[in-house]
Image (spheres, rainbow, N blue to C red):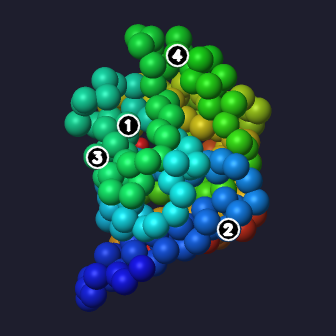
Amino acid sequence: MKTTETNDPRTRLAQDLAISVAGALREDLEQQERVILVLSGGSTPKPFMQALSVLELDWSRVDITLADERWVPTDHDDSNDRFVRTNMMINAAANARFHPLVNDEQTPEAGAGEVGERLAGLAWPASVVVLGMGGDGHTASLFPDSEQLNDGLESEAVVIAARAPSVGQPRISLTRDRLMQSRRRYLHLNGADKKSVLAQAMAGSDRQELPIRAFLDAPLALYWAP
Ligand SMILES: O=C(O)[C@H](O)[C@@H](O)[C@H](O)[C@H](O)COP(=O)(O)O
């Protein structure tokens, strides 16, 4: 793929990450009928998703899902479902299958059972999981101030419902156990603030304090730009 020439380090990083992820998907598609790509929401992934969406591979055999979701309607501005459909399920990647983390239940607690059963039927382990990180060291919807954090870190369920005072909406998140059922994990983040939070995470071990630590005891490809 000829990446569009750019001097912006974050755009170049996003393009590099897209090339790496596409290579991983192509590699696994040579070995198995279907592959799973797990993406995070937020704002960082947008240029990465758009760069990945134009790359050529057999997208019809790729199952795309989310590391977490806000339990809002899929046309809501904060919906990761909407974010992925707008930025990822386009161009060549429009042929992939997207598996939402929401359903018609009113709460994630009511909906998590169906979501978990539906996702469990995909071809785990995932080929690729792309994680982000918040300034509080959260990843997916595993938040330091969430009463469900321990469940998210310890449970063998596919997903958990999660709520936290620091976030506006109820969430649903893949558990650490499920996110670790992946051949390759990437952490994609930008900026000096997140770099220092990650450095703090690497210097300690308390996962309750900085949940990203739960992903630092196994290979994790770090994609960071200033
Ligand atoms: O739904 C979400 O918000 C994400 O899955 C979340 O875990 C995200 O990766 C971090 O909050 C970083 O978000 P930014 O990329 O917007 O900083």
Q: Nearer the viewer, residue 113 or 25?
A: 25
Instruction: Using residue 214 as the reference point, say whether residue 21 is left or right of it.
Output: left
- Mark 2 or mark 4: whose residue is earlier in sequence: 2
Residue 149 percent across, percent down from the top left: 61, 35
Residue on which the image places disc 1: 81
Which disc is residue 111 wearing?
4
Residue drawn at (51%, 34%), measured in percent from left and top? 99
Check residue 21 in the rendering and tell me which mark sits there, or answer none. none
Instruction: Find numbered disc 4 in the image and state the secondary structure of the residue it sits on.
Output: helix
Q: Residue at x 67, y 37 (%)?
A: 122
Left or right, residue 221 beside residue 180? left
Q: Which residue is mark 3?
A: 86
Asked if labels 2 and 1 touch by Cβ distance under 8 angstroms, the answer is no
Tags 3 and 2 in contact by the CB under 8 Å rule?
Answer: no
Callout 1, which amino acid? Answer: Asp
Residue nearest the viewer, comparing 142 with 110: 110
Amino acid carrying mark 3 in the image: Thr
Q: Nearer the viewer, mark 1 or mark 2?
A: 2
**SS at mark 3 in the image:** helix
**Disc 4 to disc 1, how far (Cα)?**
15 Å
> Does label 2 point to a residue whose CB lies under 8 Å from ligand 1?
no
Q: Dot 3 surroundings within 10 Å: few (below 14), some, or many (20 or more)?
A: few
For mark 1, give the secondary structure: helix
Q: Is residue 137 visible?
A: no
Identify the image quadrant of residue 6. Answer: bottom left
What amino acid type is highlighted by mark number 4? Gly
Q: Residues within 10 Å of mark 1 (few under 14, many from 20)?
A: many
Q: Which residue is mark 2?
A: 27
Q: Nearer the viewer, residue 217 or 178?
A: 178
Tag 3 and tag 4, C-beta contact below 8 Å: no
